[in-house]
Image: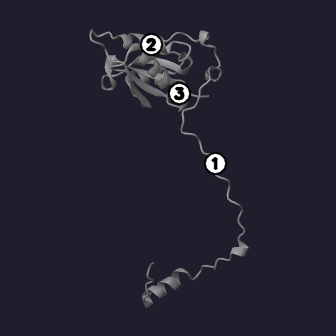
Amino acid sequence: MTRRRELTPEDAELWRFVTRNVDPYHSARHLTEEPPAPPPVESKRPAVIRPHEIAAKPPAALPSLSVGKVTDMDKRTARRLKRGELPVDGRLDLHSLTLDQAHGALTGFIRGAYGRGARCVVVVTGKGKSGEGKIRRETPHWLNQPALRPLVLAVTEARTYDGGSGAFYVLLKRKR
């Protein structure tokens, strides 16, 4: 419950001055329309991506991805990808996973990122004990498989602050 404060004579005079040109509101004069129905609530679950919805080209028609090779994009985007200047929309760390676990995690992550409209993601594979880890070696091959290739535009090695030679920038195609 709020208490109403009494107006001083100065406040009352000021209020009369402010409201001198205001007309009272009459609801009968102002008919309003029904408010629009609220938009349907979107599900928070990732979208299910069906192979026939992914790309117009069949997977066999797509060129093979090579790490560092960027095609089918403008020079500015290619330069920004290689320099690590694109905003990162997601990050996946595959350290300490087996090859099978890493493959499944990568597939799910790339599909989910594409489904939510992500553009550039970082996949951290690690370098392995000898500098050439198994997961790092296999990641480009997994990205070239028919399940993921229609979603991926380019792959390049990450900058030092994003994982260096133990990580990749993966540029995803835009959803059309």
Rendering coords of residue 111 (x, y %)? 52, 25
Visible residue check, residue 67: no
* Secondary element at image label 2: helix
Query: The N terminus is located in which quarter?
Result: bottom left
Q: Is residue 142 above or below residue 116?
A: above
* Secondary element at image label 3: helix
Q: Is residue 167 above or below residue 119?
A: above
Viewer-proximal residue among 32 and 12: 32
Query: Quick check: 5 left or right of 161?
Result: right
Q: Is residue 83 above or below residue 58?
A: below
Query: Quick check: 65 left or right of 36?
Result: left
Query: Callout 3 environment at 10 Å: few (<14), some (14 to 19), or many (20+)?
Result: many
- Give the residue pinned by disc 1: 39
> Which quadrant would residue 103 be assigned to in this image?
top left
Rendering coords of residue 92 (x, y %)? 40, 25
- Give the residue pinned by disc 3: 114
Rendering coords of residue 30 (x, y %)? 70, 70
Query: Callout 2 environment at 10 Å: few (<14), some (14 to 19), or many (20+)?
Result: some
Pointer 1 or 2: first along the chain: 1
Type of amino acid under label 2? Pro
Query: Callout 1 environment at 10 Å: few (<14), some (14 to 19), or many (20+)?
Result: few
The Cα atoms of the two marked residues, 1 and 2, are separated by 41 Å
Q: Is residue 171 above or below residue 12?
A: above
Query: The C terminus is located in which quarter?
Result: top right
Query: Quick check: 116 left or right of 163?
Result: right
Pointer 1 or 3: first along the chain: 1
- Give the residue pinned by disc 2: 140
Viewer-proximal residue among 51 and 155: 51
Type of amino acid under label 3? Tyr
Visible residue check, residue 44: yes
Residue at point 44%, 87% (across, down): 6
